[in-house]
Image (cartoon, rainbow, N blue to C red):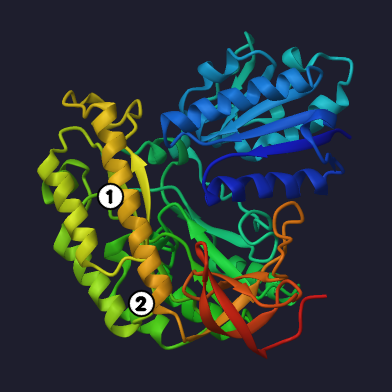
């Protein structure tokens, strides 16, 4: 069987797809290569949320082909679903497989392996192994395998063990797709309708990870708060969280991004009732201007969002509260940008993810003509990032003298060996902490926060809560 290498781009959902493909390939006897240059097959799992994400993927494909011209390059993911012909035209690409057919990549590799004398770019793929409906197979310059994403019901997911936390905090995707139609967002058109991993499978996966020794597990999705609405019988996201707490031994759950209208009083009360859910909310804001929110087709207004923030802060005074913000949406005036800055300034945000508006083909916003000049967008983004840094610094300083429960992380040997012999860790409220001394990864510690270094807090260990993962 072939050796393979997966090059990942994009969000946690895309990374989860890649992890699922890797699991399937290993189960079929393929071997994972340590680097792309030594692989028979390179799978490039793309993102398309911005134009820069597209450019990054194209650049990576060119470099991968230059480094390993003999490799069969299979491009998949959101960019492959949105614009397969663009990717098929790149040198070295053998196949472009959209999200609609991503689960069939292991079948494709198996077929390529069974025809080793056939050049990858013209490899035979038996029709019986594919769904014939709405499928397009083009021969030049590469084969394209894609279809109507809204016809697809498969749920492709496996825990992501790499990335942030260095294999200490696995991410489990439990929801995919989106039924909303925000005017700037291409994701529903490349990931399809909202669909959920059945609760029994969620519980099994979390218990398996917990029994393997992982102490913190991150739940992710494209629109996580809509989890379970497609299932029969319907399952509420909050009920799933309660079942996880009741029926598994996981020590701490962390919730990734969730829409503000899904942050209900009952959900906040659940977070406040237990130390097994990380005190961390990430709620996309996008703008503090009601007119811009309406143009974006967001289903709330600024004060609706503010009430959620105030509810969180009332019940969880030290919780991390993060937001996504888009600057430079078509027609955004200086006054509306100033309104966004003022809105963020008056509320207890602890960090921001700032994005410059990126026109995405096929979206409603792409047809708007009143574009904001690039230089103005860059200046506004700098102002928002400066505000984010000030908010983050104030939040870190508010933790001085407190005792925080942290999870130690694995050191990156290339960058984490420090003169002070401190161990990287992450708190429940999403703060980086440098713990004095050398401690094994995946260790639960109580630390007294004594100061900060750079953008990390400094903590003195007080109590080891449990033994490290062997």
Q: Residue at x 64, y 14 (%)?
A: 142
Can you identify the residue that label 2 sits on?
267
Quadrant containing the C terminus is bottom right
424 w.r.t. 116: above or below = below
Of 462 and 93, the residue lying toward us: 462
Q: Which quadrant holds residue 400?
A: bottom left
Q: Earlier in the sequence, mark 1 or mark 2?
A: 2
117 w.r.t. 207: above or below = above
Of 220 and 63, the residue lying toward us: 63
Pick out the residue farthest to the front. 419
Question: How much space separates mark 1 and mark 2, taking CA atoms?
Answer: 22 Å
Q: Position of residue 173 (x, y in %)?
A: 55, 57
Q: Position of residue 381 (x, y in %)?
A: 31, 42
Can you identify the residue that label 1 sits on?
286
Of 164 and 447, the residue lying toward us: 447
Q: Residue at x 83, y 44 (%)?
A: 28
Q: Position of residue 403 (x, y in %)?
A: 51, 87
421 w.r.t. 194: above or below = below
Q: Is residue 184 left or right of residue 109?
A: left
């Amino acid at each position: 069987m072939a050796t393979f290498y997966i090059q990942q781009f994009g969000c946690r959902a895309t990374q989860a797809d890649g992890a699922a493909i890797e699991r399937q390939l290993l189960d079929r006897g393929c071997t994972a290569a340590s680097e792309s240059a030594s692989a028979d097959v390179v799978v490039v799992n793309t993102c398309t949320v911005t134009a820069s994400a597209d450019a990054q993927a194209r650049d990576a494909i060119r470099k991968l082909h230059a480094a390993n011209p003999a490799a069969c390059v299979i491009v998949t993911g959101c960019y492959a679903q949105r614009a397969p012909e663009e990717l098929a035209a790149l040198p070295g690409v053998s196949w472009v497989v959209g999200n609609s057919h991503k689960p069939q990549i292991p079948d494709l590799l198996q077929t390529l392996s069974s025809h080793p004398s056939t050049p990858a770019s013209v490899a035979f793929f038996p029709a019986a192994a594919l769904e014939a409906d709405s499928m397009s197979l083009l021969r030049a310059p590469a084969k394209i395998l894609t279809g109507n994403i809204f016809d697809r019901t498969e749920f492709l997911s496996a825990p992501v063990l790499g990335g942030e936390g260095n294999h200490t905090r696995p991410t489990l995707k439990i929801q995919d797709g989106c039924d909303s139609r925000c005017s700037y967002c291409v994701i529903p058109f490349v990931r399809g309708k909202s669909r959920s991993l059945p609760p029994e499978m969620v519980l099994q996966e979390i218990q398996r990870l917990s029994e393997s020794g992982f102490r913190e597990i991150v739940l992710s999705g494209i629109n996580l708060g809509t989890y379970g609405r497609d299932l029969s019988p319907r399952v509420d996201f909050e009920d799933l969280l309660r079942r996880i707490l009741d029926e598994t031994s996981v020590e701490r759950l962390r919730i990734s991004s969730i829409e503000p209208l899904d942050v209900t009083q009952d959900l906040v009360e659940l977070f406040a009732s237990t130390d097994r859910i990380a005190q961390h909310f990430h709620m996309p804001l996008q703008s503090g201007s009601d007119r811009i929110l309406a143009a974006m087709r967001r289903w709330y207004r600024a004060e609706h969002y503010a009430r959620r923030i105030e509810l969180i802060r009332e019940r969880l005074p030290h919780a991390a509260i993060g937001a996504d913000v888009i600057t430079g949406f078509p027609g955004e005036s200086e006054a509306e940008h100033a309104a966004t800055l003022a809105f963020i300034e008056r509320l207890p945000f602890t960090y921001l993810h700032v994005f410059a508006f990126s026109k995405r083909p096929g979206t409603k916003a792409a047809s708007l003509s009143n574009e904001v000049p690039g230089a103005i967008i860059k200046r506004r983004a700098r102002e928002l990032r400066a505000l984010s840094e000030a908010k983050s610094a104030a939040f870190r300083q508010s933790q001085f003298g407190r005792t925080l429960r942290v999870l130690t992380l694995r050191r990156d040997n290339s960058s984490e060996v420090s003169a002070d012999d401190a161990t990287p860790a992450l708190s429940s409220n999403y703060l980086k902490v440098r713990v004095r001394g050398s401690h094994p990864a995946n260790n639960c510690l109580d630390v007294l926060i004594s100061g900060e270094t750079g953008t990390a807090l400094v903590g003195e260990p007080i109590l080891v809560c449990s033994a490290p993962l062997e």
